[in-house]
Image (cartoon, rainbow, N blue to C red):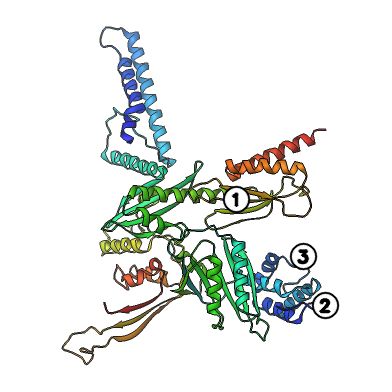
Amino acid sequence: MASSQKHGVLYQLERLEAHDQRSARPQDGHQGPQDSETDLEAKILKLRKLRDELRTKVKLHEAGARIPIANLEPYEPLKNSEENLKMKLEKAKAFFQAFHLTGLSGKLTTKGVCICFNTAFEGNILDSYYVDLIIKKPLQIHRHSVPVFIPLEQIAAKYLETNFQHFVYSLSEHLNGYSGRKYQADQLQCGFSAFLARPLQRNSLCTLLSFTYTMDPSGESFPFCARLVYQDLTTTLPTDVTITYQGTGATPASWENQRAVHETLFYKNALHKVFESFLRVRENFDCVSSVP
Amino acid sequence: MGHSSVIGMDEIVAEFIRRTILKIPVAEIGKILRIWNFIPESQLKTINLKQCKENVSQDVVELCKKKRASMKEAAILDIIYHQTCQIKKIWTVYKMTKAPGEEVDLSDMEEFKDSFKKVLQRALKNVHISFRDSEDTAVWIRIAWGTPYMKPNQYKTTYMVYHSQTPFVFISHCRIKKYIPELWQALMTAGNYHKIQQMELRSLYLDSLKAIVFKQYNQDFQTYCLTSLEEENSEVEIVDPRIIHENMKEKERIQRVTRETFGDYVQPRIEFAQYKLETKFKTDPKNGILAEREEPFRCLVKFSSPHLLEALKSLAPAGIADAPLSSLLTCIPHKAMNYFTIREK
């Protein structure tokens, strides 16, 4: 998979570079002393370029960057096999990090395989979970670090024997769903606590979130009491949103309008994104109201 | 439930608060009172924490009297004390199971609490039930038991910790054991479970029990994790290359096996493991009077330590035991058990 990429863009660059180097090589013989000057100049440029490349390589290596430094000097014979091995090791580490980023990776163990589920939400890398399987008939889960409220036994009962790929896929969906919901709840709790009239309430799977918020920092406006239900364990958006008013008395029409708008927002957007938009509204409002 | 009298705070409540404050270490009193949030900050500042504890608790009681604290608030103070300080009480783990075919339900914590309270109060007269949510989506339930003729005894309480959508309950019992069936019924009805069973897992450390049962401790999984690829530098104190470690290979093998079994991180903390043996005595058939005994030889082996799993982890590297250790010892966190019965196969 990765090697075909190597023959893509990077390979093209190498070929262009080689071509360039060949055409930069001075013609033999006929030209006079001025051209030997240009020869020397060309040589200086080439050496400088090489020096810069080596410097970058050293810097990157020191900075601990795990980006594969493949094919920087493809036609440089590597002087020393230890350096060769080191580069290979760097490449291998980079591959494993790439696998890690795909969200699903595995390693063969003595008795079977250990699958690693790396969860993420909107580009943020979240927790990893492991399932250690023993390969024998029937396929068994030896150990795992999946939280107890994820229905692992049910998923395994349904798919482990019959359709292994589906088992892995279903478990991955559940874990990513959970991680995503947990991330949103944590973001709301930590990042937007100024909006919340009382702390966020949630259950272990984060499938039921309940919170009360106000748009007005002074707390004078009517609060919104929201209850988000996620019926589908694999989704990160709620299936049911209810916003109510918990106090006594009637709510103004403006509140009702806002409520309808907010309900739609919660259905369609991640929780913290909705509150980010509230923050922007509040900031704009503050800007406008501070203008004399 | 104790009623606050018309004139002021009930004397029973006052005494209970006084005794609770006396139990709290001085360093934690301020913190706990702030979490309790019953006495306003301005009044809390007037308490001199440097005087002797008797006086501190008396001051707190006076402030509570001004605000007419009832048993309800005092019970919350008790819960906070238990949540904050390391109480020397054994926690037992119970596992509930759903009826086959039931899916994971939504589990509204408020409904759980209402349902639990209703069922228990319907079954028993004079029980005082208090709830307090903790940060990790769990609820702490405090139950003070009474009888049909006596008000609840606030000093004989049972604590339960329950995480929503999990089948586990952690219970720290007081000595009153006769209401256990009613307690189970309330739990199962509220949580929508079908059966409850005690697990062979007990410890003083609630957090460790949670780590074991929720698999939150760092188990060692074999992956291509970047950290595991980095070689750890062995300590190199010796400068002269002519000097080598004797048995270096064996040492490295032990380190590797220990790491594979226990992982790199700190183990959950438990203080004992108990093995009840009901196996036949194994010996040379010709010697000894025990040789031909048919009945199993009953014996109880108990390992104790301030931190048992870490102690086991250090046995092989210290040279006291062979690596790998017996799986009976190493399976404790995986099997979530520290009480074993070993019978003849």
Which quarter of the rendering shows the C terminus of chain A? Answer: top right
- Classify mark 3: helix, strand or loop: loop
The residue beneath circle 1 is: A228
Q: Nearer the viewer, mark 1 or mark 3?
A: 1
Chain hosting mark 1: A
Q: Residue at x 50, y 50 (%)?
A: A232
| Marking on residue B1 | none
Structural distance between the alpha carbons of marks 2 and 1: 43 Å
- Check disc 2 and give the amino acid type: Val
- Locate residue A146: give its quadrant: bottom left
Q: Nearer the viewer, mark 2 or mark 1?
A: 1
The residue beneath circle 3 is: B40
Which mark is first along the chain, 2 or 3? 2
Nearer to me, A161 or A178: A161
The residue beneath circle 2 is: B6
- Locate residue B336: give its quadrant: bottom left
Does residue B176 sit above or below B64 in this rendering? below
Structural distance between the alpha carbons of marks 1 and 3: 34 Å
Do discs 3 and 2 belong to a common subunit? yes
Q: Are marks 1 and 3 in contact (CB under 8 Å)?
A: no
Residue found at the very far left of the displayed protein = B286
Q: Position of residue B69 (x, y in %)?
A: 75, 73
- Left or right side of B299 for B121: right
Q: Position of residue A179 (x, y in %)?
A: 50, 50
Chain hosting mark 3: B
- Check disc 3 and give the amino acid type: Pro
Structural distance between the alpha carbons of marks 3 and 2: 23 Å
Chain hosting mark 2: B
- Classify mark 1: helix, strand or loop: strand
Q: Are marks 3 and 2 in contact (CB under 8 Å)?
A: no
Nearer to me, A282 or B27: A282
Badge 3: residue crowd in 10 Å (few <14, some 14–19, many ≥20): few
